[in-house]
């Protein structure tokens, strides 16, 4: 979703700004732009890719010491150039057609909920709007408060904003200053190495190779950046010192290696990612989940919390939600702990019955998803103080907000469709299940040893599943010609069917739905024809015979089946039934393995259809607005 980069420097900063945008491309965007102070304010905007923005600024010889840049993922107003950021304010009564130069340039990530009221009052004061965005309101608002000091104008403006924002602004009359502010959307400050420049960005990755000295701005902070100094005030506008952390961010952008797309690379990285995630896990100990501390201090103790709770509430969105759905089967089946899994955007607004003895578990690869953060806050506001996150970004807002944390080590995931982040979440959730089972006295030493052995086997098992790729390529040739697909699973593999359908729709734009196979005859069977491929996840578990009956129901209606069967499952390929045999039977950890062929199926079908695999239309990697 929207990405921000800003810089106040003593050198031409345009290359750093645009490279920063390139590193934020993975978040998803549909237009981009940059504004610099070059005598006055100038800007370049495009609905094309950041690479084209780079060509444009190069051809136009755009240079400046101070600037702001942005990738926009449209919310208010279509993805057209006049809605792209940066937005200008020319002052009341003036607009792009006037001879007066612009006074304020602004970029924004978030949603301003009171933008209509603000727009009306600014229009009444003579401000001319040239976009449909909520962002332009902030540019004019800052201009309306401007009296020679941009920092003061931003501080006065943010007081009037309702909603979520991270902003960066520059001003015609103060050529060496960038002002930033955040509430509800992420923004970091990068401290330049030699004391001659400072930066703003949506995440540390945007500044990889520029600086590793990072300040995570907190809710309500406003920051004044100049080349040799910076100054932060908190939400009450009192001066505040924030910790500077050394953050090794990797862009990952240059590492495509032998792969065609990041999605393919990330699917094939899963043995490594799971291996890294489990590295150092010698035994099941609650300390695996100890908090990393909100300000570098020692975090909360998982040992005490695991003993105290008697319920789990999982909050997440998208793929992360499906990993939570799978974990429910483990948490109730192995740890015997009642578990509720909620879509974060639903939970945050519904009436629910809180229980303070609940462990609230958020699952998020980015750690910045607005709805998941808001759902966590909602749970806390209801008195549920035991919070834990399974997250892939140790420095994210979510890790800072939760008392306990398990950091997965998937590494940076660039492809919008999540793959390795999902399987590493499952690994973290399985460990959490075992840790809770142990805390409740429900994990024998023998079971602990057996589960750990099975977990350590995962990287090897994943390699052998990845070797099935040629068979999935063959299936993808059939799927590429279809417009609909149905996915079936039962029990622990129902969430895997859901995730398989999500992957297919995200990257191929084929309409895909998943059902618990037992639900087939309650509706979806009506859709089954020879034009509707039906994927079945069929491990050799207690539900296999029931699943086989469901598959017969599909065949009897002329449906064509694509079955992921375990090695020892008695389902064979025949007319209308295509079977891929998984190399082993994986027991409780089976979801981590069965999802991989579904990822490969989606990926290769997308390649066959020629879609933009890593950046599917309309989707964003980091969903920082609700
Ligand atoms: C977006 C991404 C998905 C991700 C979801 C939740 O939709 O494209 O890959 O599953 O957000 O994101 P989170 O960072 O909270 O896991």
Image (cartoon, rainbow, N blue to C red):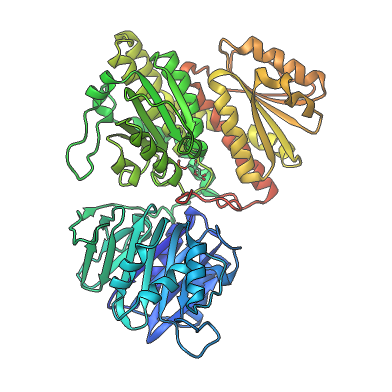
Q: Residue at x 52, y 63 (%)?
A: 116
Does residue 446 appear left or right of residue 561 in this picture?
A: left
Does residue 333 appear left or right of residue 218 in this picture?
A: right
Q: Residue at x 75, y 41 (%)?
A: 483
Q: Note whether 589 is above or below 52 in the view shown.
A: above
Q: Note whether 197 is above or below 482 in the view shown.
A: below
Tell me where residue 105 sits by quadrant: bottom left
Does residue 285 appear left or right of residue 340 in this picture?
A: left
Residue 442 place in picture, x, y as percent: 33, 10
Residue 328 place in picture, x, y as percent: 46, 22
Tell me where residue 208 sits by quadrant: bottom left
Residue extending furthest toward the bottom: 99
Residues 322 and 341: in front is 341
Residues 5 and 142: in front is 142
Q: Note whether 199 is above or below 335 in the view shown.
A: below
Q: Residue at x 27, y 64 (%)?
A: 223
Q: Note whether 519 is above or below 615 in the view shown.
A: above
Q: Residue at x 45, y 51 (%)?
A: 624
Residue 175 place in picture, x, y as percent: 32, 81
Count of numbered labels shown in the rendering: 0
Residue 468 appears in the picture as rendered: no
Residue 509 place in picture, x, y as percent: 67, 45
Residues 575 and 79: in front is 79
Residue 239 appears in the picture as rendered: yes
């Amino acid at each position: 979703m929207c990405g921000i980069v800003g810089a106040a420097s003593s050198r031409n900063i345009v290359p750093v700004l645009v490279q920063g945008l390139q590193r934020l491309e993975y978040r998803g965007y549909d237009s981009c732009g940059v504004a610099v102070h070059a005598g006055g304010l100038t800007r370049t905007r495009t609905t094309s890719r950041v690479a084209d923005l780079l060509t444009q600024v190069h051809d136009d010889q755009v240079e400046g010491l101070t600037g702001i840049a942005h990738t926009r993922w449209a919310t208010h107003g279509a993805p057209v150039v006049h809605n792209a950021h940066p937005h200008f304010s020319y002052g009341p009564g003036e607009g792009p057609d006037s001879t007066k130069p612009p006074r304020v340039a602004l970029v924004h990530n978030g949603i301003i909920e009171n933008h209509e009221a603000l727009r009306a009052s600014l229009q009444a004061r003579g401000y001319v709007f040239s976009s449909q965005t909520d962002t332009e309101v902030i540019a004019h608002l800052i201009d309306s408060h401007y009296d020679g000091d941009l920092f003061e104008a931003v501080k006065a403006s943010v007081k009037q904003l309702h909603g979520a924002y991270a902003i960066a602004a520059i001003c015609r009359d103060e050529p060496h200053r960038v002002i930033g502010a955040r509430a509800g959307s992420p923004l970091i400050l990068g401290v330049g190495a030699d004391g001659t420049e400072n930066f703003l960005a949506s995440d540390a990755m945007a500044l990889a190779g520029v600086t590793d000295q990072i300040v995570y701005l907190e809710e309500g902070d406003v920051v004044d950046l100049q080349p040799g100094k910076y100054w932060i005030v908190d939400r009450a506008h009192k001066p505040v010192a924030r910790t500077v952390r050394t953050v090794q961010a990797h862009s990952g952008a240059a590492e495509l290696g032998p792969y065609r797309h990041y999605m393919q690379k990330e699917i094939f990285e899963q043995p490594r990612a799971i291996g890294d995630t489990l590295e150092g896990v010698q035994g099941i100990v609650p300390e695996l989940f100890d908090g990393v501390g909100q300000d570098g201090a020692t975090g909360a103790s998982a040992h005490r919390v695991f003993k105290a709770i008697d319920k789990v509430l999982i909050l997440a969105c998208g793929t992360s939600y499906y990993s939570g759905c799978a974990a429910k089967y483990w948490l109730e089946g192995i740890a015997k702990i009642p578990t509720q899994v909620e879509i974060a955007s639903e939970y945050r607004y519904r009436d629910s019955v809180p229980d303070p003895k609940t462990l609230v578990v958020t699952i998020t690869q980015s750690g910045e998803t607005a709805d998941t953060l808001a759902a966590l806050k909602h749970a806390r506001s209801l008195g549920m103080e035991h919070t834990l996150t399974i997250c892939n970004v140790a420095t994210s807002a979510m890790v800072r907000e939760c008392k306990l944390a398990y950091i997965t080590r998937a590494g940076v995931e660039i492809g919008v469709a999540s793959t390795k982040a999902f399987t590493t979440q499952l690994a973290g959730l399985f460990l959490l299940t075992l840790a809770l089972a142990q805390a409740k006295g429900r994990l024998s030493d023998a079971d602990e040893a057996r589960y750990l052995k099975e977990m350590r086997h995962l990287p090897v098992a994943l390699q052998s599943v990845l070797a099935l790729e040629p068979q999935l390529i063959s299936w993808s040739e059939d799927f590429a010609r279809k417009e609909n697909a149905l996915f079936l699973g039962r029990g622990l593999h129902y969430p895997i069917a859901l995730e398989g359908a999500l992957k297919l729709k995200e990257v191929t734009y084929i309409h895909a739905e998943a059902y618990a196979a037992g639900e087939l005859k309650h509706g979806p069977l009506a859709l089954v024809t020879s034009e509707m491929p039906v994927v079945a996840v069929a491990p050799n578990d207690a539900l296999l015979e029931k699943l086989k009956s469901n598959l017969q129901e599909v065949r009897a209606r002329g449906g064509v089946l694509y079955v992921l069967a375990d090695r020892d499952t008695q389902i064979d390929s025949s007319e209308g039934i295509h079977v891929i045999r998984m190399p082993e039977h994986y027991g409780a950890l089976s979801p981590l393995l069965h999802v991989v062929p579904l990822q490969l199926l989606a990926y290769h079908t997308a390649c066959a259809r020629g879609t933009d695999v890593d950046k599917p239309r309309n989707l964003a990697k980091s969903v920082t607005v609700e």
